[in-house]
Image (tube, coloured by chain):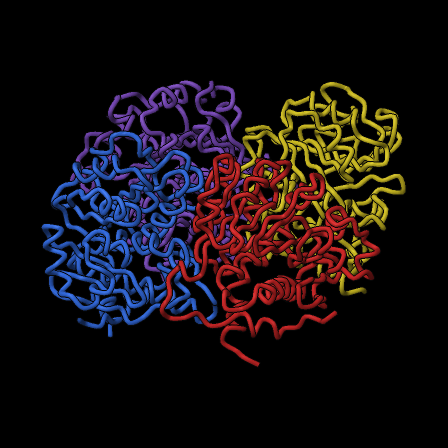
Chain colours: A blue, B red, C yellow, D purple
Amino acid sequence: MKQLSEKILYQVITPRPAQSHKGTFGRVLIIGGTAEFGGAVIMNAMAAVYAGAGLVTVATDTANFTALHSHLPEAMVVDFNQDLTTLIQNNDVILIGSGLGDRLDILQATFRAVFPKQILIVDGSALTLLAENHINLPHARLVLTPHQMEWQRITGISIAQQAFEAFNVLGRDRLKQMPIVVLKQHHTQIYTSKDIYELPIGGPYQATGGMGDTLAGIIAGFAAQFFLASLSDVVLAAVYSHSAIADELAKTQYIVLPTQISQQLPKFMKHYAVTKP
Amino acid sequence: MKQLSEKILYQVITPRPAQSHKGTFGRVLIIGGTAEFGGAVIMNAMAAVYAGAGLVTVATDTANFTALHSHLPEAMVVDFNQDLTTLIQNNDVILIGSGLGDRLDILQATFRAVFPKQILIVDGSALTLLAENHINLPHARLVLTPHQMEWQRITGISIAQQAFEAFNVLGRDRLKQMPIVVLKQHHTQIYTSKDIYELPIGGPYQATGGMGDTLAGIIAGFAAQFFLASLSDVVLAAVYSHSAIADELAKTQYIVLPTQISQQLPKFMKHYAVTKP
Amino acid sequence: MKQLSEKILYQVITPRPAQSHKGTFGRVLIIGGTAEFGGAVIMNAMAAVYAGAGLVTVATDTANFTALHSHLPEAMVVDFNQDLTTLIQNNDVILIGSGLGDRLDILQATFRAVFPKQILIVDGSALTLLAENHINLPHARLVLTPHQMEWQRITGISIAQQAFEAFNVLGRDRLKQMPIVVLKQHHTQIYTSKDIYELPIGGPYQATGGMGDTLAGIIAGFAAQFFLASLSDVVLAAVYSHSAIADELAKTQYIVLPTQISQQLPKFMKHYAVTKP
Amino acid sequence: MKQLSEKILYQVITPRPAQSHKGTFGRVLIIGGTAEFGGAVIMNAMAAVYAGAGLVTVATDTANFTALHSHLPEAMVVDFNQDLTTLIQNNDVILIGSGLGDRLDILQATFRAVFPKQILIVDGSALTLLAENHINLPHARLVLTPHQMEWQRITGISIAQQAFEAFNVLGRDRLKQMPIVVLKQHHTQIYTSKDIYELPIGGPYQATGGMGDTLAGIIAGFAAQFFLASLSDVVLAAVYSHSAIADELAKTQYIVLPTQISQQLPKFMKHYAVTKP
């Protein structure tokens, strides 16, 4: 297991090419948010936009359109009760699951629509649906962001075992493939096909509702624009950024709100793009 | 009667354990907010989230979902016209009554559903409903937050008597039990089974609509996470924090808005967690 | 004609009594805001709340509830299509007309309901309705806030005459009484039963939509709480504050937004309450 | 081709006349925003209001009213599904197309209603509709704000040719007239009847969704109030301001959000109004 460090940020967050337009920095489609859990996709989308995704569309319950636009006129909205196939296929990165509730139908339709070359991030309720319904993951460039308990339900590996067992062997066996897994916990671990990484930063001030939705959104935003880095490195950089910003805010705050992390992203990222160690 | 002081904050607001997750810091369910008084639950929820509650759910009129999410994507929402029994029993702290209007049905259903081990905070309209309908309080770890007039209506003790009579004897007699009572007034008094406390701080800049909703939310947020302290101490710390922040803001402001107090909570609490007298 | 000066602020804005509660600082009812002009009552209400009114209720089209609460959970909302008689009579200050559109029915019902002892501020569309329909003003402590053209339509006094004629004679004749009139123009004039005052401050950076709605809200907020001053003095202080804040903001801004003025009120007012010349 | 410089700002952004009112600074009507693309008109309107337009009305899907008012109570709203003819003719500047989607009917009705003396800015979806349906532009003081690909579709001039061909000859031929064209690209070019200008500033931090909507709104806001300058100069100043603010923000931010640019306008413009080179 390798310790993740600030170095990954210098590698992944690079200056933008002058000759570019919003398409250059990727299209992100966020799918989630029932009427009760609409806050989750708002936090996804804020993170993706502030992280610098070129274009962000949110497919959600129509009940969430206004609150989303109140935070973020920069994002587009679509009713997630319509056929999303074309929309899915026209985006570079799909993030599904935050606040998705029991909408298994939407999860399955998304899994059917996604292309192998697309980046698919599976978060929140989608992971619970995955575990409960034993459905297969689609062929795509996959990122999963489970808490330890969610991961136990999906893989059958108990939380106790997760720390000791050869994760990638067991995981691969059950899932028939090896996605990148962000296993959220006190010191989050990231499982990639190359190695296992541990996040040495972050703290209990992050233990508030919506923190995971924000992380998933940062991963999506980074994946959309940093296409020159490997997807593994992109995920590592996103996870590191999320907690590094929280650590900084926690110097003067007892707790850190997820939306505060998103708002810090443009200033935080600037440093790593212009300074090289 | 004891004078409340800053000491209570050093006792109650402690550093968070590193090994923790949002569940560690408690689940708060806020019930209130008719379409006309939706602002009340928004202020409840902002206070609870900024105070550091792990997870906050607001059961309210669906008309309030969007405004709540515009302020606070971190909170989840539920229609309060559905059966809330399971939801109530899955939360650690229940705050009912801010902006509840005349919804006696919801108050009674909540009182029936709550478990004795749960913390139940009764605020605002719920106190008026209590007085008007002479319904009994349920067995729970109770906190009541009446204004003087509300308290007179509930207990039959006149405002004049409140200051002189042995409050706890009369109160216990009428209520068949002794909840913690936050009796809001110029110098707020807090009645606990141990003692009566008086708040020596605060001022008339706090005399604006929503100030009480914010206090109730801070109590809920503190009760959810500071489970190592006694509930009495938690309430005392919440009441003290609320006015201490107001005093600080009032150094440069003629009046203080309730939402400004909530926004200061993370910075305010930090000081007491890291500094010990 | 007297020149208005900063002195009026020292007179009107006084320290709050320690023994007080939100009722002490008055109840304001704002009536206005069709679905198309909902922004007007949002700006009314922000001004009244930031100015320090004890309790603010907005009677408006239900379409505006959510946007209002997104800005201001501190305010309560009521559908203005219901009978407002009791509500009107339970408030100390009524502000009617901002964004009221063509709702003559609501204006007339309000005029019928209001008591002579109540303060009634008539603004915006209500002034147009007044002029077009030649309806009589009710007996109340009246404040009118017309632009020059609106005043011409109401009184029949042309804009050219307004500057030269004995305003109060003509006005009294037509209106059968003499309300306080805030005649908005380059240097706004305020007509009271005592004298005519001219505002020497303010500037063209205030020439943006909503500036008048904010002024009306400040008048309402001041009238609700500064009951020890005469209503004339209260109106003079509100008009002066509105432009003094704008002048300060305009030192670094090409234009000033109405909502920025409201947000500055608590800090601005603090100075005059604690410092005396 | 001329290089655009800061000089244009000193020319166009002048001190406001003291004797003025909101009508002096123009009425802007923004038409656009289906339920899915409501954010576009919010960004249009924020830009126009913060730029200093006297009065801003947004004709949009009713689904967008609340989110717009949450950002901007200063703007009025109208359902764009009603007959807008009178409203169009009562405004000085019409901005149509941001987030208009496939609403060809609204575009055509607007083209029929507009007067030759009015300023008409055509942006976003309206440019796509223009290209797909080969409809003629109306007689008006026209400003078009296409991306290079949109311009290719409208004129038949390929992106490669755009840089080399005599733009104005080809454009005039196809369009039967010569509008001012803001051809958005790495170094945006502005085609006027006098000359072609190139914007030497700006950068890839602007490559985020909504940046164009904000530019269109600034053009509208400038056109409404700076009526003493030629429309060409007004457009040049708006384009320059948009990127100059972005450059300034990008000194400390990796990306710049469109709404951040709007919020900086009042401070940015102040400098050029009071300082002359």
Left or right of B86, for residue C162: right
The picture places residue D69, in percent across and down from the top left corner, at 52, 38
Residue D230 vs B192, above or below: the answer is above
Camera sees residue D225:
no
The picture places residue D274, in percent across and down from the top left corner, at 55, 55
A36 and C130: which is toward the camera: A36
D221 and B221: which is toward the camera: B221
Q: In which quarter of the image is residue B247?
A: bottom right
Q: In which quarter of the image is residue A152?
A: bottom left
Left or right of A21, for residue A37: right
Residue A242 vs C217, above or below: the answer is below
Residue at 31% from the left image edge and 38% from the top image edge: A59
Residue A117 vs D172, above or below: the answer is below
Residue at 47% from the left image edge and 50% from the top image edge: D263
Q: In which quarter of the image is residue C28?
A: top right
Residue at 82% from the left image edge and 45% from the top image edge: C197
A253 and B98: which is toward the camera: B98
Left or right of C183, for residue A133: left
How many badges with numbers are in the image?
0
The picture places residue C17, in percent across and down from the top left corner, at 80, 58
